[in-house]
């Protein structure tokens, strides 16, 4: 029996009342597919078939991913996803999962124990298709969010940047060089990553990547076409520059940013709206940014009115007691200082989202050895993050639980264990699958993070690292430090 027909069986009933039923008749294919049709390709198939469109993982009619292979696009995607959701899992472990799957079938199929075919199958995954899967997850989450359940009538988006490292290979060094401050051969290639999140759902909307020396301001301009009329964008003080504020106003969106320290914070100027609340006139900079054309720079207005507000924070967990912000929300009655301060305080949620990506999913250190695979590995991490957030949103809506109090790590553990039970149930027993799925959602909703007002989380380490010296030259040129016993024997010989 061909593997192509085995892959083509992708008819799973959606068990969530929120998204309805998406299924296709399978009685006409059952006689053709034989006994293998009652078995899933992977344990993650029980979850992914609900959220990820099946046509995105279908084999192509011609060209790449059109041949009948053991590692079909869907099986490769599910195995890669499982590898990302289990940080530290090697390609060898992923191959063992595939071997175990085929050995449990009524008609066992021999799969090579070598990981090279699986790595080649990962390289055949279309990067644009992976980005489309991530975008489809984001779109479905936005549609699933009930009206009035967000932070307000207007969508709120938040932007922030971070950096990632990868193996020290010549290919990675050429694409993403290590920081200039590090000695050649003693550092790791680094990538600058800028992420745009939805503050209502926690989903990652888009990302922009570049070399470590690339400015976040330059990457920030890639997100402007994604802003719709009525959106509110939150960010720290690096994003509150003149051109960004003018572009947001032109697109019908608004921004709330911290005021750059280079700007004058004199509240005796401008039009007074209240205490520490003024309308200021900003003027167009004389120097044009290097990455803008003369035509783009000519469209920038000569001056614009920006509101500057000083907000005091009473939360003892904050690092500052007061902050000066700039915003294009000029109506002080509709947007009072307290409301602006509350929105700006929610910007800290993006730090927690990045922590879920870099710490929980361990995306801070990527493992592939070539830039093309680094990009695919990055997209798979983002898909895994959005998939976990989608299940958190579904649990929040179905069980009426606060979304931002659900545990990301708890959801990840719950999905991995319940999917093992769901995959053992035949497709025909849809009611039993529905019971397990709803039990999974209720378990996710019950795992709430406790409220900790005033809790301080300093960025420090308690466990001391081992006292090994740092690498100051390439490893092949370094020599081990002399042992203490050898040093004593050499310099204090026994008479």
Image (cartoon, helix red, strand yellow):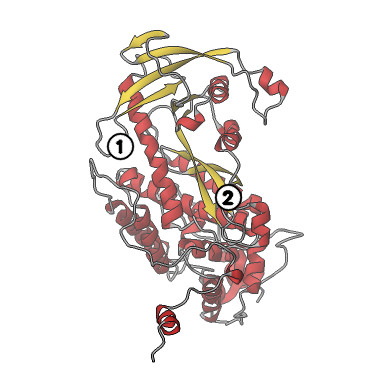
Marks 2 and 1 close (CB-CB < 8 Å): no
Q: Earlier in the sequence, mark 2 or mark 1?
A: 2
Residue 220, position as x, y percentages in the image: 56, 35
Front residue (pair 112, 398): 112
Disc 2 crowd rating (10 Å Cα; few below 14, some 14-19, many 20+) is some
Tell me the CA gap for discs 2 and 1: 31 Å
Mark 1 crowdedness (10 Å alpha carbons): few <14, some 14-19, many ≥20: some
Q: Could you say where residue 475 lies in the image, as x and y percent from the top left?
A: 58, 69
Q: Residue at x 59, y 19 (%)?
A: 285
User: In front here: 444 or 421?
Assistant: 444
- Which callout, 2 or 1, points to the residue nearer the camera? 2
Which circle marks residue 246 in the picture? none
User: Height in image: 214 above or below 494?
Assistant: above
For image coordinates 34% across by 63% down, the residue present is: 464
Residue drawn at point x = 58 percent, y = 62 percent: 167
Where is residue 217? Give x, y as percent.
Answer: 56, 34
Residue 179's tag is 2
Report which residue position mark 1 lands on: 318
Pick whichever, 9 or 372, lies toward us.
Answer: 372
Q: Quadrant of the C terminus?
A: bottom left
Q: From the viewer's perspective, is residue 366 above or below residue 161?
A: below
Q: Where 285 sits versus 107, above or below?
A: above
Query: SS for tag 1?
Result: loop
Among all residues in the image, which is located at the extreme front?
Answer: 495
């Amino acid at each position: 029996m061909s593997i192509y027909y085995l892959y083509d069986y992708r008819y799973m009933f959606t068990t969530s009342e929120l998204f309805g039923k998406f299924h296709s008749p399978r009685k006409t294919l059952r006689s053709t597919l034989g006994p293998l049709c009652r078995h899933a390709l992977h344990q993650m198939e029980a979850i992914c078939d609900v959220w990820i469109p099946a046509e995105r993982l279908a084999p192509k009619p011609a060209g790449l991913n059109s041949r009948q292979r053991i590692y079909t696009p869907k099986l490769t995607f599910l195995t890669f996803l499982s590898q990302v959701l289990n940080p530290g899992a090697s390609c060898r472990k992923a191959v063992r999962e595939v071997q175990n799957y085929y050995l449990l079938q009524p008609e066992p199929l021999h799969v090579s124990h070598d990981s090279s075919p699986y790595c080649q199958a990962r390289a055949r995954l279309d990067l644009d298709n992976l980005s489309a899967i991530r975008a489809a997850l984001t779109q479905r989450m936005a549609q699933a969010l009930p009206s009035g359940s967000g932070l307000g009538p207007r969508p709120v988006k938040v932007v922030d940047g971070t950096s990632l490292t990868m193996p020290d290979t010549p290919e990675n060094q050429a694409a993403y060089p290590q920081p200039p401050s590090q000695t050649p051969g003693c550092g790791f290639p680094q990538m600058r990553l800028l992420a745009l999140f939805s503050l209502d759902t926690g989903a990652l909307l888009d990302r922009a990547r570049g070399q470590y020396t690339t400015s976040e301001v330059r990457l920030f301009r890639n997100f402007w076409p994604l802003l719709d009329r009525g959106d509110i964008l939150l960010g720290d003080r690096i994003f509150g520059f003149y051109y960004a504020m003018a572009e947001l106003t032109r697109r019908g969106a608004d921004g709330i940013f911290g005021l750059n320290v280079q700007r004058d914070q004199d509240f005796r100027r401008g039009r007074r709206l209240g205490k520490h609340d003024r309308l200021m006139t900003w003027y167009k900079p004389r120097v044009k940014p290097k990455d803008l054309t003369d035509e783009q720079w000519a469209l920038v207005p000569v001056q614009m009115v920006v509101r500057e507000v000083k907000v005091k924070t009473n939360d003892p967990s904050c690092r500052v007691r007061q902050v000066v912000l700039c915003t294009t929300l000029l109506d002080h009655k509709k947007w009072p200082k307290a409301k602006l301060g509350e929105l700006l305080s929610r910007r800290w949620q993006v730090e927690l989202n990045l922590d879920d990506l870099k710490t929980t999913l361990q995306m801070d250190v990527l493992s592939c050895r070539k830039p093309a695979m680094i990009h695919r590995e990055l997209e798979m991490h983002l898909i895994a993050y959005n998939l976990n957030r989608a299940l958190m949103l579904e649990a929040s809506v179905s069980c009426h639980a606060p979304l931002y109090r659900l545990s990301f790590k708890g959801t990840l553990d719950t999905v991995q264990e319940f999917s093992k039970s769901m995959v053992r149930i035949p497709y025909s027993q849809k009611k039993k699958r529905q019971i397990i799925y709803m039990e999974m959602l209720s378990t996710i909703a019950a795992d709430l993070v406790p409220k900790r007002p005033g809790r301080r989380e300093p960025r420090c380490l308690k466990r001391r690292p081992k006292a090994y010296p740092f690498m100051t030259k390439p490893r092949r040129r370094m020599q081990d430090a002399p042992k203490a016993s050898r040093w004593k024997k050499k310099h204090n010989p026994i008479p």
